[in-house]
Amino acid sequence: MGRPTMLVSKLRALEAEIEAWAQVNGRAASRDRLYREIWDVLTGGAAFEAVRECSRRASGLASWIASHLRRARDNALGKALLEYTELGASHVVACRRWGVRPSEWQYLLELASYLDEKVRRGVRLREWPAAWLSEAEEGHQEAVVLVEDQALQDMVLGALEAYSVPKGRGSRYSEVYGVCFGSVKTEQWETRGYGRQWLEHVLVRRVALQLRAQTTSGSVRRSPRSQAVHLEMAHDLFPHLDLVGDFHSHPYTTLERLRYCRGWEYTRGDEEDNVAWLAEIAEAGYHPRVGLILAIARAAKAQGGRHPAANILRSTIGRCHCYLAAYRINRDGTYSTSDVTLRCPTITGLGAT
């Protein structure tokens, strides 16, 4: 099992405090409830409450453990258990990925046995925090995003117009926003030791631009009413397509500024807005998979170069330079760049133009 880590030592000390409390107060029946609270803290990110009432020392130990799990370890023990049970990875692979020591894993198994929790690979053990699931799935999920010509034209025409035609006094250009329609095909398989793996093929066929979205040169706020109309019309015009994501542009004055700011990347505000949008759209039964960003700027002449990453394509269209980037949308609404490949038939040859 190996030498106990500081975390295991603190957990054992907390158990001793619980046992002493139960013996002195004659509350053996309440002991299991306290152990259950430890389990919930370790595996679900819950907070200590009842355990703190056992003694002053128990409260201090609980504070140390909670802080250690939350900050120093980022709930690594619970995430390793998630990957083992939910995604079917071996305990060796799961512990190595999250930095969990053998003594900590053994402690978790002993606690599970005491509480009669059935810890088995590939079996749902509990409702996991969405953020944990998103993070754990990073090593198990890939996405290939194919943008068809029609969808690319929808995005580029809208972005170029908003970039080239001033919106009004004091505003040289503005962002644009749209909803992506297409289809998703998923392939799944098992890899020895690493558990369940899957590849999503996301086909983007149409992009409906929101003419009533509130836009500025550096921000865009989607219109719920426009979204409702687009979803209703899409059901009649192309019922074979589903909502697969959304799109917005990032305009820049110069290509140098675009590159310096890495304008193809999403901002913190973009991600926070997407988290809220996913929660809203999920209630209506939609599950967006990708977020597309088109960074655009003018330059004196066409410039070649390689694509910055597999999820980014660059090209020169008209007098503007464009970087199109795709990001996978996690189940908690955050974005992911891990194992995302973007393909577009219109943009050829590694972006050299």
Image (tube, helix red, strand yellow):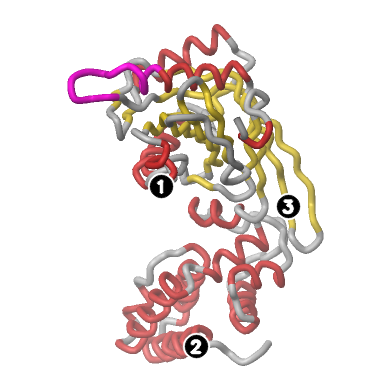
Q: Which residues are magenta?
A: 161-172
The outermost residue toward the right is 192
The outermost residue toward the left is 169
Residue 247 horizontal/vertical position (percent) = 47, 29
* 24 within the magenta span: no
For disc 3, the marked residue is 196
Residue 137 horizontal/vertical position (percent) = 61, 53
Residue at x-position 38% and y-position 72%: 48
Secondary structure under tag 2 reads: helix
Up/down of 183 relative to 21, above or below = above
Looking at marks 1 and 2 on the same chain, the residue that comes earlier in the sequence is marked by: 2
Residue 23 horizontal/vertical position (percent) = 43, 90
Looking at marks 1 and 3 on the same chain, the residue that comes earlier in the sequence is marked by: 3
What secondary structure is the stretch in magenta mostly built from? loop
Corner quadrant of residue 191: bottom right
Name the quarter where the C terminus is drawn.
top right
Image position of 160 (left or right of 81): left
Name the quarter where the N terminus is drawn.
bottom right
The image's mark for residue 48 is: none
Dot 3 amino acid type: Arg
The outermost residue toward the top is 236
Looking at marks 3 and 2 on the same chain, the residue that comes earlier in the sequence is marked by: 2
Q: Nearer the viewer, residue 244 or 337?
A: 337
Pair 1/2: label in front:
1
Label 1 to label 2: alpha-carbon separation? 44 Å
For disc 2, the marked residue is 6
Residue 21 horizontal/vertical position (percent) = 39, 87
Secondary structure under tag 3 reads: strand
Mark 3 Cα within 10 Å, few/some/many (few <14, many 20+)? many
For disc 1, the marked residue is 260
Q: How many marks?
A: 3
Dot 2 amino acid type: Met
